Structure formats: structure tokens, C-alpha cells
Image (tube, rainbow, N blue to C red):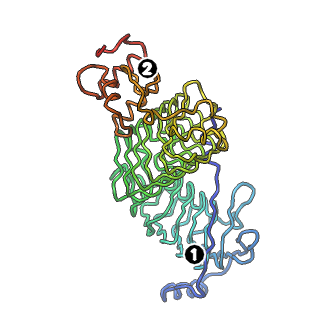
Amino acid sequence: MKKNIWKIIIAGAVTLSPITFPQFADTSDTELFDNKINIVNASIVDSGNCGTEEHESELTWSLDSDGVLRVSGYGSMNDYSGFNVCPWENHKDQIKKIIIDYGITNIGGHAFEKCEKLSSVSIPNTITNIGDCTFRDCTDLTSVVIPDSVTVIGKAAFYCCSSLSSVTILGDDINIGLWTFDKTPWIEEKQKENPLVIVNNTLILGVTCSGDVIIPDNVTRICDYAFLQANLLNSVIIPESVKNIGEFAFCDCKRLKSVIISEGITNIKEYTFGYCDSLLSVTLPDSLTNIDPYAFSSCDELVSVTIPGNVSNIGDGAFNDCWNLASVFFESSKPAELGSAVFGKPSDKLTIYVPADKIENYKNATEWDYYADIISASPSDNETLTYKMGDFDGDGKVDITDLSALSLYLVGDREFTEAQVNAADVTGDGNTDLADLAHLRQFLSKKTEKFDAE
């Protein structure tokens, strides 16, 4: 049964890494002067604690009569959502400026949401994480500088900041969540310049892309959700420069048919290509070692996939609900560790091909016994196979497995023997090309009863 994709997307949490702080903050003379003036001219309106439960007293906040809210101390701010409202909730309409002191490691989720008069925020370079919805609907905020210490900006952190026209991101290894800058002038202007929004070699957004897209070879990271529901995207080529593709990055791209991932990627994360209903072909690199849970879940049109030899782990439901999946080719002599229901309930169509001399190893491996009846020797390992017209795997029948094999051959992801190439020339014109693929499709859909070459 398919899961509700939005329940899956909206759910989630961020884990913070510990950080060690120096004894003293770097504060400019100008900042010191401004702070002294503030102390002289403004009185404290309210104050309290705002740290996480185990360190609540280690972080304090104060709001003065000029509308300046300061957070001080060392460690992590609390997250505020649901019934856990922020301690300055009743003063949000007074907050004009926020100063986060050096030593704070994260800005809590929802902390300053709907501070509509906020026009300025100072973020120190000890912050590593900005939480979900932290500055959402801060409609007077015009600019923000994100220091290079920040590695994560949460979902909708600056969503609907309708005056935010200037964003400076100093770091070159940052992951940006879903809707983080949506409905801001800054992101809208960026998208006008280029539908691929790239900042410091990080591709943060590509949802307005269409057609065939080649990611530039200076990009090193594709953020979580970057192409979520990019429904005009037909194909994508990801270059060797990309070392990290975020979770949900290409999720729910309804027209995406072809994906080529170059060497360098070691992990396909959760739901990276989930719910891509039209995905026909995916080329995975030899560098790949892990396929996370539900990475290709609900790719209804995927008929064949080759799992490179270095893949050692495939997570729960990675290919679940891929109803037309007919052929999975494993190149490794050692069975990968499988999670539960990796291929869902095996269909009558599915065959898992493994090296001929390792069949028993696969059938006897943990979790593999569930698929034992559909494990077969890779056709390339059996040189005695004979091929008839349209039958490229030598199993004596022409079916969707042959269609998928020809698709992979034509994009360079499968090698054919000379006999297979000849069997693939179903048009009989001396070439094995897209015309043969189209003719084979017609044959399988019964629009034609025989091959031209016969």
C-alpha cells in the first residue's frame, strides 16, 4: 500500500552535532559601543530561559524597550511548536531586532515565527542549525547573512518573508530544507535568473526546471527536496562533481523518465526518487555502496535496474510498489544486506539475476530466502544461450524483460554480445537503435504481430 507522501515529507527531525567553543567571543568595537548605548537608553521589558530541557538555565533571553531581543549563553536553543510556545510569544509584535550571542549552537524551530516587525537579525558563526519555521512570516525582514558554520537550514525557515530580498550564504556545505525560502523576493529573483538555483556550488532548488537537465559540473551537493514535484522534468544527468544528493531530492517528479548518476555518489537516500511514476531508466554508478529505505519506492514504470557491485546495503522497501519491475541485475559476487520488503511482494514479472556461480550464496543469505524462487543466473554468465529475434536474455520468450534490456543497452548501461545485438535488430535494417525499441514496444502491446526482420 502506498504511503501518504506529504505525511512522510513533513515528518522528520534534525540531529545536531556537538561543538566546542572558545572562551571568548569575537565582538567588534562597533558592536560593543552599540550594546552599551542600548543598555543606557533601553530598559528590560521581559527575560527568562530558552535552552533545551537539560540545559534550560544555560541559555537566557531578554527583550528591551527598543524591541531588541538578545539570546545569550552556550548551547542549544529550545524548539517551539504545538503547545510548547516560545517564552516571548506575547511580545512578538514588539520585536524589531534579534541578536544571537556567540556560543549559541542552534536557533530553535518556530522561535521567531510571525515576528512581523522584525527587520534585523544577527547570527554568530557558532550556529550550526537554523530550525524549521524559525523566521517564517517575518514580513519586515529584508536581509540575512548565514555564516559558514551553518550546515542545516530547516523546513520553511524563512517561508513567506515577503520583504526578504537579500540572502548571503557564506558556507559551501549546507543543506537547505523544504520551502525554506519559498515566497521570498530573493528566491523568486534567483529563479528568474536560472531555474537551477545554485549557491556556493550547492544546488538548493530546481523545481521550475523542465525538459532534459544536465546538472552543472561545479555542483557538489543537491539539497533535500531540491526538485520535489518538478513535474516538467523529463530527464536528469548528475555529474561526477556531485558527492551528495539529499533525501526527497527528486521525489514525486511525475514526468521524470531517465536518470544518469555519474561516479562519486555513494548513497541514494530515503525517497530520493520515490513516487517518480514515469521513471523508466536509472543508471547507478560503481561508487554506490548504499541504497536507503524507499529510495525508488512507487516508481511504477521502472522495468529494469542494475545494482552495481559495490552496493552492500539496500534499505527497507527501496523498490517497494514498483509494479512493473521485471529485471534486477546484481553485479556483486557477495549478496548485499537487505532490509524488509526491498522489492515488496514479488510479482510474477520479477526476476533477480545474480552471478551464475553465486546463486546458492544469494538464496541462502539473510532476507534473500524470500526471493529465492525468482533468483536466476545473469544471462551474460551463460555463453551457451541462444537468442531468437527479440529475445535478448535467452529465456525463450519475448517480454518486458527484453524491452528493459534493450533500453539499458541503448543508453550504454548494458553490454550486448554480437548475438544479442543481432536479435535486437527487430526492424531488420542492420542497425540496433531506437527504432527497434519502438517496434518492440508495438509488438508487446500487440499493435504489431511480428517483427520486420522476420
Say which residue appears at 61% left-offset and 85% top-offset: 39
Label 1 neighbour load within 10 Å: few <14, some 14-19, many 20+: some
Image coordinates for residue 424, horizontal then vertical, percent: 33, 25
Q: Secondary structure at mark 1?
A: strand
Image coordinates for residue 414, horizontal then vertical, percent: 38, 38
Q: Residue furthest left?
A: 430
Query: Where does label 1 land, which residue?
Result: 99
Q: Give me the C-alpha separation between circle 2 and circle 1.
A: 69 Å
Q: Nearer the viewer, residue 200 or 320?
A: 320
Mark 1 is on which residue type? Ile
Locate residue 340: give its quadrant.
Answer: top right
Is 382 above or below relative to 239? Answer: above
Please tell me whether mark 2 or mark 1 is closer to you in this view. Answer: 2
- N-term-proximal mark, 2 vs 1: 1
Q: Is residue 244 left or right of residue 450?
A: right
Mark on residue 398?
A: 2
Q: Nearer the viewer, residue 353 or 135?
A: 353
Say which residue appears at 61% left-offset and 75% top-offset: 19
Mark 2 is on which residue type? Val
Q: Nearer the viewer, residue 330 or 274?
A: 330
| Viewer can see residue 114 | no
Locate residue 256: give its quadrant.
Answer: top left
Q: Nearer the viewer, residue 452 or 26?
A: 452
Image coordinates for residue 6, horizontal then vertical, percent: 60, 42
Quadrant containing the C terminus is top left
Number of marks: 2
